[in-house]
Image (cartoon, rainbow, N blue to C red):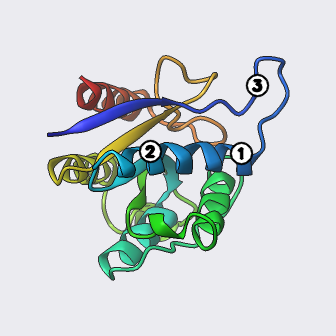
């Protein structure tokens, strides 16, 4: 059974005050814990990543590890806080909660910035990875915030996705949610 859940995670509350990265991380962790307690094999959260982060995240998980060391601002800071909390009070979620990166940009110049692949090829591989998690019985949380709603929070902020890639990501994630 494949389960893709639209996961509303605002970075501002109803009064317009910012929700801290730690509180957003706790929301992800609490939802993951609830799902794991109900019998789900594993949980992943979509994440708007740069190519270097995507490569590192997959390298860590392929090595059987759980701590990716993802860092940066906005969503990346939430991932940093999430993994920090998984070192302590949420340690039972290690190996059961993953980051599901969707590559929205690169900081690299060599090889076109995407390891010799096109940006579309990388995004297609990211979406295929999410499908593999779903096929393995994992639940994937599709991150939605107040700026992206009703769409997924992928490619906002400093990333400026070409419309064809934005449509591919949004359409595919929406299909997974059906």
Q: Quadrant of the C terminus?
A: top left
Does residue 103 appear in the picture of this structure?
no
Q: Is residue 65 above or below residue 125?
A: below
Instruction: Tell which tag, 3 or 2, sits nearer the viewer.
Output: 2
Q: Is 79 on the left or on the right of 66, as rendered? A: right
Residue at the location (53% across, 66% down)?
Answer: 109
Residue 34 badge: 2
Q: Position of residue 62 (x, y in %)?
A: 30, 76
Distance from disc 1 to disc 3, alpha carbons, whole Å, reads 11 Å
**39 or 118, which is in the foreground?**
39
Query: Most extreme residue toward the front, as rendered?
Result: 37
Looking at the image, tell me whether mark 1 or mark 3 is earlier in sequence order.
3
Label 1 sits on residue = 23
Q: How many marks?
A: 3
Does residue 137 appear in the picture of this structure?
yes
Instruction: Tell which tag, 1 or 2, sits nearer the viewer.
Output: 2
Q: SS class of the residue under badge 3? A: loop
Mark 3–mark 2 CB contact (< 8 Å): no
Distance from disc 1 to disc 2, alpha carbons, whole Å, reads 16 Å
Label 3 sits on residue = 13
Q: Is residue 23 above or below residue 9?
A: below
Distance from disc 3 to disc 2, alpha carbons, whole Å, reads 22 Å
Q: Position of residue 117 (x, y in %)?
A: 30, 60
Q: To which quarter of the image does residue 122 belong?
A: bottom left
Q: Is 173 on the left or on the right of 31, as rendered? A: left
């Amino acid at each position: 059974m494949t389960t893709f859940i639209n996961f509303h995670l605002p970075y501002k509350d109803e009064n317009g005050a910012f929700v801290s990265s730690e509180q957003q991380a706790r929301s992800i962790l609490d939802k993951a814990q609830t799902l794991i307690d109900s019998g789900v094999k594993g949980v992943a959260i979509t994440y708007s990543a740069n190519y270097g982060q995507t490569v590192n995240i997959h390298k860590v998980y392929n090595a059987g590890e759980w701590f990716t060391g993802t860092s940066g601002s906005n969503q990346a800071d939430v991932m940093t806080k999430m993994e920090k909390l998984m070192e302590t009070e949420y340690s039972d979620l290690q190996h059961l909660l993953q980051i599901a990166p969707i590559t929205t940009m690169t900081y690299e110049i060599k090889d076109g910035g995407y390891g010799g692949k096109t940006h579309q090829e990388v995004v297609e591989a990211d979406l295929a990875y999410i499908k593999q998690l779903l096929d393995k019985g994992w639940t994937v949380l599709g991150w939605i915030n107040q700026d992206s709603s009703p769409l997924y929070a992928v490619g906002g902020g400093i990333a400026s996705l070409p419309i064809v890639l934005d449509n591919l990501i949004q359409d595919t994630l929406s299909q997974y949610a059906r």
